Amino acid sequence: MEIEELKSKIEAVLFITSKAMHPSEIAQILNTEEEAVENALLDLVFDYSSRQGALEIDDEDGYIIQVKAQYMDIVEKLCPVELSPAVLKTLTVIALKEPIRQTALKELRSNAYEHIAILLEQGLISKNKDKNGRSFNIRTTKKFQEYFKLKGDIKALVKRLDATQDLKDL
């Protein structure tokens, strides 16, 4: 696997995770050598730090993508409910894949149960037993659409976005 492809895959892992990840965990997920992951991570950290964007890769206790401190005021204006970046990522997954089974969400987001509780408390999602009664279906609520000033169906919005830009750029 070439370095740029590996960096892109690592970036995807870091974006979707809700916790800092160690190179060994990333290597296992990507089924590649830990040394290759470590080298790609160093390149990726350098890429993020050199482009002077709003995101950074924090490597204090593992690696995770986060908003730089100087831009948190913007995040707070958009999300005054005070949702952590990890909870916002979980909400993003719910919005893009709704309705999503709670068990499927748990596979994608390791802290899903904790995040679901927070999002339910804020009224941004709802959950109902699925037809077999073993899991819950989760979807966003009208409050979610109002809060993020979305009009219409989320699926239609995603299709419009997908038609105008690559979703990887979001």
Image (cartoon, helix red, strand yellow):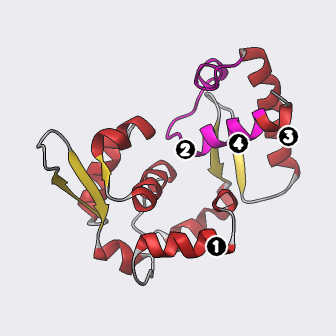
Q: Identify the residue at image location x=61%, y=28%.
A: 61
Whether residue 1 is visible, yes or no, is yes
The amino acid at mark 4 is Ile
Q: Are marks 1 and 3 in contact (CB under 8 Å)?
A: no
Q: Is residue 151 left or right of residue 37?
A: left
Circle nearer the N terminus (1, 3): 3
Task: Read off the residue under disc 4.
Answer: 57
Numbered disc in front, either 4 or 1: 1
Is disc 1 surrounded by few (<14), some (14 to 19) or many (20+) residues within 10 Å?
A: few
Residue interval drawn in magenta: 6-32
Q: State left or right for residue 61 relative to residue 18.
A: right
**Residue on which disc 1 sits:** 163
Q: Which residue is mark 2?
A: 16
Q: What is the C-alpha distance between the residues marked 1 and 2?
A: 23 Å
Label 1 or label 2, whichever comes before in sequence order: 2
Three-letter amino acid code at disc 3? Answer: Phe
Disc 1 marks a residue whose amino acid type is Ala
Q: Quadrant of the N terminus?
A: top right
Q: Is residue 16 magenta?
A: yes
Q: In terms of sequence position, does the residue under pointer 2 or pointer 4 come before the other?
A: 2
Q: CA distance from mark 1 to mark 3?
A: 32 Å
Amino acid type at image mark 2: Ile
Q: CA distance from mark 3 to mark 4?
A: 9 Å
Residue occupied by mark 3: 46
Q: x, y percentage for residue 11?
A: 69, 41
Q: Can you tell which of label 1 and label 2 is closer to the viewer?
A: 1
Farthest-out residue, right: 50
| Secondary structure of residue under mark 1 | helix
Mark closer to the chain start, 4 or 1: 4
Mark 2 or 3: in front is: 2
Tell me if residue 109 can be seen.
no
| Secondary structure at numbered mark 2 | helix
